[in-house]
Each structure stands twice: as structure tokens, then as C-alpha cells.
Image: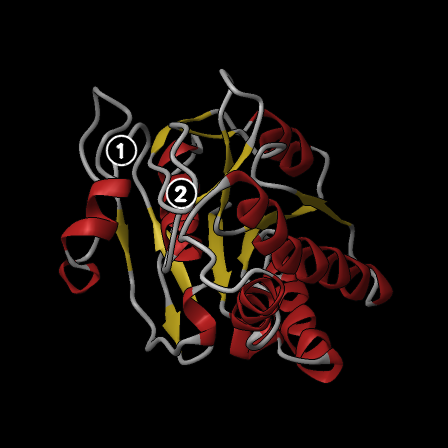
Amino acid sequence: MSLIVQKFGGSSVADAESIKRVAKRIVETRKRGDDVVVVVSAMGDTTDELLDLARAVVPGLPAGGRELDMLLTAGERISMALLAMAIKSQGAEAVSFTGSQAGMLTDDRHGSARIVSVTPGRVRQALDEGQIAIVQGFAGFNKVTGDITTLGRGGSDTSAVALAAALDRPTSARSTPTSTESSAPTRASCRAPARWGASRARRCSSWPPRARRCSTSAASSTRAATA
């Protein structure tokens, strides 16, 4: 049995019909006998719309900040819950997790946090119980402050690679126009694709300290898919 880590960007879950199509594909993957973890972005342009709303309320709003992170992570919470509901309606078992519930621990920088460790105990438990795990992309949690953080643009890609590296079992990799599926040997560290650029690669390069490799097969991205 393989562990498949799939990432679906905003354009893939932009509306109800899109979410149902994605759910069908995920269920088909599970029926092949694979364990499935799904990292999901906010629906469509939700992240941009929330940011525009914040700037309308507070003209000249500075980048980052605790309350902005609280606002922006709402988009992924909506899509992860709806996707889990859609999967259940198609006869499979699924459970959704926020970034903090999935063990995505970061430093305390709001808007551009870096992952310091991933402890996906609840995700592993869900897989052991035969469930599909749906994880909020883009978001993490700082244990010292107790606050939600965001990983910045492209953060859902970073979340997917981080989970693939942290989970204990080997994964297989496939790529399609609507998702990214990540591969990671056991105890692999995170080496981001060159196309990510230096800033995104750094967010994914500092953990775990003893490890070898983490890779992702890259699907083409859009603005909506990078949140």
C-alpha cells in the first residue's frame, strides 16, 4: 500500500461542482488501495478576496500580522470541511484537519512563517483508521505564542511537501493539471523544487535536521492555486 499526498489548488476547488469532482478523484485513489492525504487551498480567489476586504476595512493595512493570518486561513478551513463532506457523501471516510491539528509547527512570523517541525500524529491515526485525511494548506501554528501562522504565497505547496516528508511511509508521485502529488522517502528532509525560488525553498528547508530528500512533482500553478 502506498501513501499518496495530493495537493489541490484554489482553481480545483473553486465551486461546489469542482469540489465534488475532486472528491470523486480522491475516492477513486483510495479505492485503488492507497492511503490518501489531501492538502487543499482556499476556493478560487478567496484568499485575494479576503485580503481585498481587509484592505477596504483598514486602508494601508501592513503585510502580515496576527489578525490578518486569522482572517486569511478561514478560506482553507472552508474548503477542507466542504471537501471532507463531499468525500463522505460518496461513501468514503474522511476527516479534515487544520494546519495546527495536523502538527504543522512554525516560527512566530505572521505572513511568512517557516516550518520548524511537523508532528502529524492525528493524520497518521486517521490513516490507520482507514480515513482520508484532508489538511488545511497554507497554515501553521506557533507553540510559544499559541497563534495561527501562514506560510505566505505558495504555502499550500509547502504544506504538502512538508507532510510528505514527515509521514513515516514511502509515497509514490504523480502529477496532473489539477493537483500536485508529492513523494518522500522515510525521514526525508524537504528539498523544494527549483521553480519555487529561494524564499519558498527556505520555508521548507530547515527541518528535520537529520534526513535526506523530499520531492514534489509539480503541476502548473495559477494565482488561485498558490494560496
Task: Give the class, few, some or many, for how many residues have Cα within 10 Å of label 2's Cα (few <14, many ≥20).
Answer: many
* Residue that extends furthest to the top in the rendered view of this protein: 144
Query: Disc 2 residue type?
Result: Ala
Residue receiving disc 2: 164
Query: Disc 1 residue type?
Result: Ala
Residue at x-position 61% and y-position 68%? 53
Q: CA distance from mark 1 to mark 2?
A: 9 Å
Residue toward you, 169 or 43: 43
Q: Position of residue 199 (x, y in %)?
A: 20, 50
Residue at x-position 84% and y-position 62%? 91
Is 163 left or right of 34, judged from the image as shown? left
Q: Position of residue 15 (x, y in %)?
A: 69, 80
Is 157 left or right of 47, judged from the image as shown? left
- Mark positioned earlier in the residue sequence (1 or 2): 2
Mark 2 secondary-structure assignment: helix
Residue 181, picture quadrant: bottom left
Query: Residue 188, labelled with which disc?
Result: 1
Q: Are marks 1 and 2 in contact (CB under 8 Å)?
A: yes
Residue toward you, 146 or 28: 146
Is 216 left or right of 211, judged from the image as shown? right
Is 163 left or right of 83, judged from the image as shown? left
Q: Position of residue 147 (x, y in %)?
A: 56, 29
